[in-house]
Image: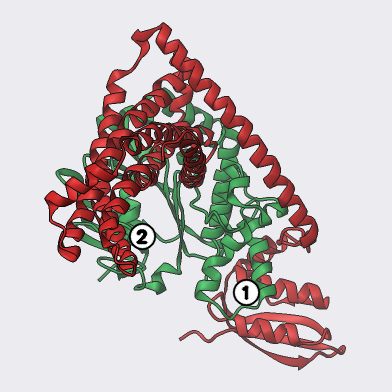
Chain colours: A green, B red
Amino acid sequence: MPDRDNIIEVRGLRNAFGDQVIHDGLDLDVKRGEILGVVGGSGTGKSVLMRSIIGLQNPEEGEIRVFGESMRDKEEDEATEVRRRWGVLFQGGALFSTLTVAENVQVPLKEFYPDFSKATLDEIARYKIHLSGLPPEAAFKFPSELSGGMKKRAGLARALAMDPDLLFLDEPTAGLDPIGAARFDALTLNLKQTLGLTVFLITHDLDSLYAICDRVAVLADRQVIAVGKIDELLAIDHPWINEYFSGPRGRAAKSGHDRGITKMSVDKPSPDGP
Amino acid sequence: MIEPADFTQDTAEEGGLILRLNGAWTIAGVADADKRLRALGDAVRHIDLSAVEHIDTVGAWIVYRTARDMGADIVGVNANARSLIEAVGGVDSNDSIAPPVISPIIKLIGELGDAVLTAFGTMVQFIAFMGQCVKAIIDLILHPRRFRIHAVVQHFEHAGVRALPIVGMMSFLIGIVIAQQGAVQLRQFGAEVFTVNLVGRLTLRELGVLMTAIMVAGRSGSAFAAQIGTMKITEEVDAMRTIGVVPTEALVIPRIMATVVMMPLLAMYSSIIAMIGGGLLCWIALDIPPATFVQRIREVVPFTDLLVGLVKAPVFGAIIAMAGCFQGMRVEGNSEEVGLKTTAAVVQAIFLVIVLDAFFAVFFTGIGWN
């Protein structure tokens, strides 16, 4: 019987491209209401793991359950009940280039809930764009008119369109300047606390890990070799983990975190949750 | 089972209405309640959320908006609902999310002006690009060591050898079509035998080279634009410049050279295959045996017809390669541009080829090669 507190359960996942095995016997749980950071060297299959969970990549073996429902071999028009409960932010934003930001946000709404009136759809798009930290005039801009950071925020607005319980973020702070990255981290944390989101966060950004992640999963050797709070990971003796967290950048992020530089104040009350 | 969003109306003690909301005020079930709320008057004084089972940001927004529009206050909220309402209520503006509307006449005039300026600018850029090519060729003649023979040979293969099957197939069918249509028309005058003239002269003078040019523009012109355009986006072209390699020399000249050399060969090949196709049809439909067909071709097709084709082919090749490389070099910014410029390269190449072909037709007639 699946654990009810686990939003995502991955068991014995195996992914391979030809002879190249990406994952073999990978297990991972994501608990309700947490921000799980996923780290790993380049080519360890962080994005492939995410694509397997959201059904863009068919694994060779293994079981994937999201909200308790198996996602294996599901076609695009199946499991829509699960699909409408998650939002995905791709690396480049993946906005539809022929639509404005507001229309991008309305795409999933119109797809699943055609009953909403035009006025309500516009209002929903407006407040989602606001929640994502974009200025109001961004609503009628096309993706090509936005900067990289704004594209990510617009992608986040679309990912939030359906009021998801679960949010996938693929390297949201990559390519942003440190100030923009810190703001995006603050935004993620704020949204998680306000909306009660569970977040699956792929990142290379050590500051993000320290600042907002409840737990961190480390991908190496085709598996999740460790999951836990950063303090617990630091105690593990594994060459990659040691190098990652104890290298110069890891130490800098840790000292910054310890001094409270990356600590963010969020003055919203935490949700009671129904 | 969670009930969809619903509400009841009560009269408040101090006058006005109390809305008592119940059910799940979530995105899945709130559309109907939203419409009914919009239809209500503005006599509502309180909105009571205490019976709401579940609420998300869409429900919170609708509650917030209703309260704002009616001047009502919200009561019976738990901390979760309060934080959601505060979060969505932060954006209290009526800013339109649609772009500002412009009058269609002004828009039309603006677009026309843009189009004229773009066309003029493109023409100037193309002339500048041809100048760059000429300069690069002179530089290469002065410094022959910088000439990239490997790249040229590689493009020989891509633009020439690999085009053989498709060009051959197409030419064969075109030859059959010309012979068949010609035979049907000429039969009305009892002049079927002139089908041979038609096939021989038309393919060598016009169709062989023209069809090949169109095929090469579609295959290689587009490929040039896409390759160079992609290299522009990945900043490979900029990297070349910083290293001291001239992109025109390294990327453009080998492609132009290869196409200029390959086009006459392909055009010749295309004409021969088309004549084979036409000859086959003459044999089957008109009972003209192959030996007679070849004999007639030698009698009726002047040598200048072959020259006409062979003079035009390298010019067309240069135009196609230059259009492809030019559009590729114009790619700026995002990957969408690559597709646009690739399309532009093919359209521009075919257009220029046909315009030049018309000039050539007049010119060759003028010098008596007819």
Near mark 2 (Cα within 10 A), the count class, few <14, some 14-19 or many ≥20, is many
Q: Amino acid at mark 1?
A: Gly
Q: Quadrant of residue B92?
A: bottom right
- Residue A191 to residue B243: above or below: below
Distance between mark 1 and mark 2 Cα atoms:
27 Å
Q: Quadrant of the N terminus of chain B?
A: bottom left
Q: Where's the C terminus of chain B, which quadrant?
A: top left
In the foreground, B3 or B133: B133
Number of numbered discs? 2
Residue at the spot x=58%, y=25% of the render? B128
**Residue at the extreme front of the image, as rendered:** B190
- Residue under the point 79% across and 60% down: B105
Q: Give me the chain letter of mark 1.
A: B
In the foreground, B22 or A188: A188
* Place of residue B20 in the rendered image (x, y in percent of width and height, measured from the top left): 69, 86
The type of residue carrying mark 2 is Ile
